[in-house]
Image (cartoon, rainbow, N blue to C red):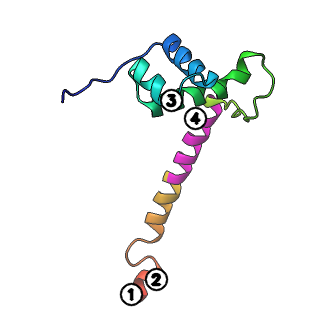
């Protein structure tokens, strides 16, 4: 049995096969044999088509919440600020708990 390579199918081909699956004129097995793809792949394309279909007809709500757009500059500034603060606190902790300087270390 020869090893099959992965096929790269065009979006038009995927849409054609998914629409044929939605129409239901042939079974998934029949479509898979006709187009030489796995039935699970046809099911995945069909699901993608159905999920994206609502977005084609307008910019109305699709039922999914969109993630808020984050201001990357502000987030990078906050990361830098917290890193400096963390380094400063780590340095202060190192000086405060030097051997013999900390009550706990003297008790141990």
- Which secondary structure type mostly characterizes the magenta part of the structure? helix
Vertical relation: 95 (above or below) 17: below
Label 2 with label 4: CB-CB less than 8 Å = no
Q: Earlier in the sequence, mark 4 or mark 3?
A: 3
Residue in the picture at 40% in, 71% down: 98
Q: Dot 4: within a 10 Å radius of its alpha carbon, few (fewer than 14), some, or many (20 or more) residues?
A: few
Residue 33's tag is: none
Q: Which residue is mark 1?
A: 108
Residue in the picture at 52% in, 11% down: 12
Q: What is the CA distance from the residue labelled 1 to the residue labelled 2?
A: 6 Å
Quarter of the figure with the C terminus: bottom left
Q: Secondary structure at mark 3?
A: helix
Label 1 with label 2: CB-CB less than 8 Å = yes
Quarter of the figure with the N terminus: top left
Find the magenta span and give its range.
Answer: 73-86
Q: Secondary structure at mark 1?
A: loop
Q: Is residue 107 magenta?
A: no
In the rendered structure, the answer to whether residue 101 lies left or right of residue 18 reads left
Q: Which residue is mark 2?
A: 104
Q: What is the CA distance from the residue labelled 2 to the residue labelled 4?
A: 38 Å
Q: Which residue is mark 3?
A: 28
Q: How far from the left and from the top, in percent, is residue 68?
A: 71, 33
Q: How far from the left and from the top, in percent, is residue 10?
A: 46, 12
Q: How far from the left and from the top, in percent, is residue 102?
A: 46, 78
Q: What is the CA distance from the residue labelled 4 to the residue labelled 3?
A: 49 Å
Q: Which residue is mark 4?
A: 76
| Comparing labels 4 and 3, the label whose residue is closer to the camera | 3
Q: What is the CA distance from the residue labelled 3 to the residue labelled 2?
A: 72 Å
């Amino acid at each position: 049995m020869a090893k099959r390579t992965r096929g790269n199918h065009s979006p038009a081909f995927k849409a054609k096969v998914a629409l044929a699956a939605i129409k239901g004129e042939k079974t998934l097995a029949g479509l898979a044999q006709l187009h030489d793809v796995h039935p699970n792949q046809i099911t995945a394309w069909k699901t993608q088509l159905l999920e994206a279909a609502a977005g084609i007809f307008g910019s109305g709500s699709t039922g999914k919440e969109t993630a808020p757009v984050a201001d990357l500059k502000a987030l990078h500034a906050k990361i830098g600020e917290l890193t400096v603060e963390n380094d400063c606190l780590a340095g202060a902790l190192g000086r405060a708990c030097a051997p013999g300087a900390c009550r706990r270390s003297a008790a141990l």
